[in-house]
């Protein structure tokens, strides 16, 4: 099995070969850049900055992306122009903040360093994404109430996204998030008054693939935990006018 550094070096080599002068930079972000990468549970998240994103230019990179996704089993790289990435900081606040907090430039210039993330919109994205997950979990339960065989994989899959959002909940409260998943869960639960035990059960499920306990109380505690996090966000950071720049007299 190739090492992480070997895989990334080969990705950059192929990107440079096929994109040529159109490639401005390649940046690794997420757990692999922060230092909490886990081989069995973490992905290699990469953003590529191109000068042009025309269909012709994208077509030249299709072979590279297929190799990365199919052969290496990694998520597809994100492709932006420099201006697009900067202008996306309001709608992709979580993702770009992750890039700012933990990144490694694999090729080219660091185009992320000077991007400003509007933290009011960061809080809105956290709520949006959490509410979306909560709604989907309710829908899944309605389709298979009490069915552990069907629901356990859904819980396991959902928690990777929830763990990222809990990390950003800690950031929204003005704190530097812990590194380990267990500590993120504990701190987010403490800040929001939710159940660390409910989220720990999901963490164990994510790591082992085994559900500890009966599905109905476990599923219910997880939903209640998410509801408590959302209530805390609304209580501590009530929505106001979510414009990017406020008027001087507002």
Image (tube, rainbow, N blue to C red):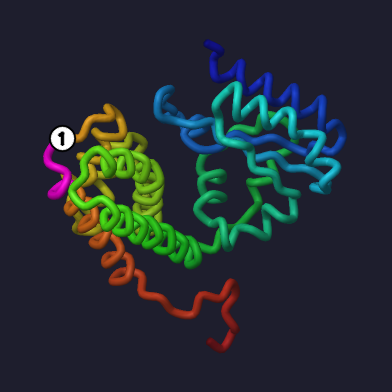
| Residue 137, percent from left and from top | 32, 54
| Residue at 66 percent of width and 20 percent of height | 9
Q: Nearer the viewer, residue 131 or 242?
A: 131
| Residue 101, percent from left and from top | 51, 43
Question: In terms of image quadrants, where is residue 141?
Answer: bottom left
Mark 1 highlights which residue?
Answer: 212
Q: Nearer the viewer, residue 172 or 215?
A: 215
Q: Is residue 174 visible?
A: no
| Residue 26, percent from left and from top | 69, 35
Give, as a single range, the part of the protein colored magenta: 212-218
| Residue at 60 percent of width and 30 percent of height | 69
Judged left or right of residue 158, residue 73 is right
Q: Nearer the viewer, residue 134 or 196?
A: 134
Residue occupying the far bottom of the picture: 249
Q: Is residue 197 above or below residue 94?
A: above
Total numbered labels: 1
Question: In terms of image quadrants, where is residue 149?
Answer: top left
Q: Is residue 224 above or below residue 213?
A: below
Residue occupying the far top of the picture: 1
For label 1, count other residues whose C-alpha is less than 10 Å away and answer few (under 14), some (14-19) or many (20+): few
Q: Secondary structure at mark 1?
A: loop
Residue occupying the far front of the picture: 143
| Residue at 20 percent of width and 56 percent of height | 194
**142 inside magenta stretch:** no
| Residue at 36 percent of width and 45 percent of height | 158
| Residue 150, percent from left and from top | 28, 42
Judged left or right of residue 57, residue 171 is left
Q: Nearer the viewer, residue 156 or 100?
A: 156
Q: Is residue 43 visible?
A: yes
């Amino acid at each position: 099995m190739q090492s992480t550094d070997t895989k990334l070096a080969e990705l950059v080599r192929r990107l440079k070969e096929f994109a040529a002068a159109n490639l401005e930079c390649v940046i690794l972000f997420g757990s692999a850049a922060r230092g909490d990468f886990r081989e069995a549970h973490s992905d290699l998240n990469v953003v590529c900055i191109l000068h042009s994103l025309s269909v012709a230019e994208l077509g030249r990179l299709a072979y590279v992306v297929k190799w990365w996704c199919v052969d290496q089993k990694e998520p597809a790289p994100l492709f932006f122009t420099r201006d697009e990435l900067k202008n996306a900081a309001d709608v992709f606040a979580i993702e770009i903040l992750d890039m700012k907090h933990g990144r490694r430039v694999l090729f080219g210039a660091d185009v992320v360093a000077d991007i400003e993330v509007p933290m009011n919109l960061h809080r809105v994205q956290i709520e949006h994404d959490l509410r979306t997950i909560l709604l989907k979990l309710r829908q899944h339960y309605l389709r298979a109430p009490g069915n552990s065989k069907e629901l356990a994989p859904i819980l396991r899959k959902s928690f990777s996204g929830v763990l990222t959002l809990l990390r950003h909940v800690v950031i929204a409260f003005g704190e530097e998030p812990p590194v380990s998943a267990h500590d993120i869960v504990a701190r987010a639960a403490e800040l929001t008054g939710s159940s660390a035990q409910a989220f720990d059960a999901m963490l164990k499920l994510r790591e082992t693939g085994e559900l500890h306990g009966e599905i109905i109380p476990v599923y219910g505690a997880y939903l209640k935990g998410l509801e408590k996090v959302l209530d805390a966000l609304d209580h501590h950071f009530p929505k106001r006018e979510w414009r990017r720049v406020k008027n001087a007299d507002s």
